[in-house]
Image (spheres, grey):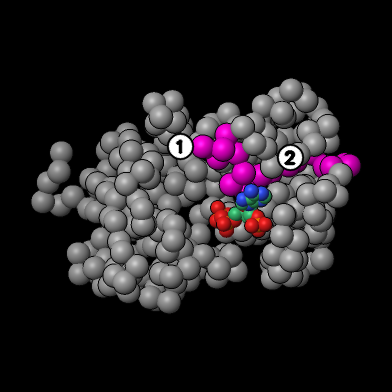
Amino acid sequence: MISGSTGILGVIGDPVQHSASPAMHNAALTATGLNFVYVAFHVLPKRVPEVTEAMRALQIRGLNVTVPYKQAVMEHLDEISPEAATIGAVNTIERTPEGRLIGHNTDAYGITASLREDGGLQHLPEQVVLLGAGGAARAILYALLQAEEVKDVVLVNRTVARAEALAGELDTSGRTRVCSPQDLAIDGARLLINSTSVGMSPDAEVSPLADDSVLHNDLVVVDIVYRPLHTRLLQQAQKAGARTVDGLGMLAHQGARSFEIWTGTKAPVAIMRETLENIASSN
Ligand code: ATR
């Protein structure tokens, strides 16, 4: 029940009406009995500078930030977490009780938690293959390099120069090797993550891996694409006997972390995941 003391959470983006975050977070709020609602705000580019003023004026407790504003909001915040600063993107804004606006990035946490909980990887393997060098790859490469046990990341991208730039920016320990899709050999890698948009509906018949003979049964294969849920890459992986992790894991876990930042309450991640699955199966 919405009352006079109901707090507000939300997401800003353009477009935003297809976001699954309102359903996911409202399910979590209902399950935990917290007196908040979570709504989607369609914000036009020229109004982005006003979002932080609106948060302060309306005492909005927190916002998620989605495409295309993850960088654009940064200059308007009072503080950026070290993680968000290194990744170079904010997906979560927290308004503290004192009214300070802090930018966080929960995507790196999201992939790590999904690898652990959905992929069964308490410790990450020494060698990892990461496909892609765009916005999603930034948070994932950051997360991989945070894990000391990861000794070697093979960063594969169609535009090799973009992968080189990303590795140069994020990797200060020289653990990232860049290679083109044509030269990809999986060798000793036990984990392969697709962070490209290849295979996303309506191009669901394509895979970011042209040659699926590189896959083997000792791999965990993660696809962050979740439309469709069972992507061509995950089908190839399953055929090769590899363990597969779909893109709803990272989405649920990044949302759970945002929820915890705003509410201080442990997020019901299983309920959040189930809500996402229901949306995916009704699409
Ligand atoms: P996001 O924020 O979702 O990561 P992005 O920053 O546009 O989106 O990055 C998209 C990623 O998918 C990039 O790695 C891109 O490769 P390029 O850097 O070479 O553009 C990759 N990608 C998109 N379409 C692709 C395609 N048809 N073939 C190969 N890679 C593709």
Q: Position of residue 212 (x, y in %)?
A: 78, 33
- Quickly name the residue at label 1: 269
Three-letter code, disc 1 = Val
Secondary element at tag 2: loop
Look at mark 2 in the image and give the residue it sits on.
209
User: Is residue 146 shown above or below 77?
Assistant: above
Residue appearing at x 56%, y 38% in the figure: 203
Q: Nearer the viewer, residue 99 or 11?
A: 11
Give the percent coordinates (x, y) of residue 230. Answer: 58, 28
Q: 263 left or right of 111?
A: left
1 or 2: mark nearer the eye: 2
* Quadrant, the C terminus: top left
Q: Earlier along the polypeptide chain: callout 1 or callout 2?
A: 2
Question: Secondary structure beneath disc 1?
Answer: helix
Which of 160 and 32 lies nearest the eye of the viewer? 160
For the residues labelled 1 and 2, say whether their Cβ atoms are less than 8 Å apart.
no
Q: Give the residues drawn in magenta, as a range.
A: 186-204
Q: Is residue 194 magenta?
A: yes
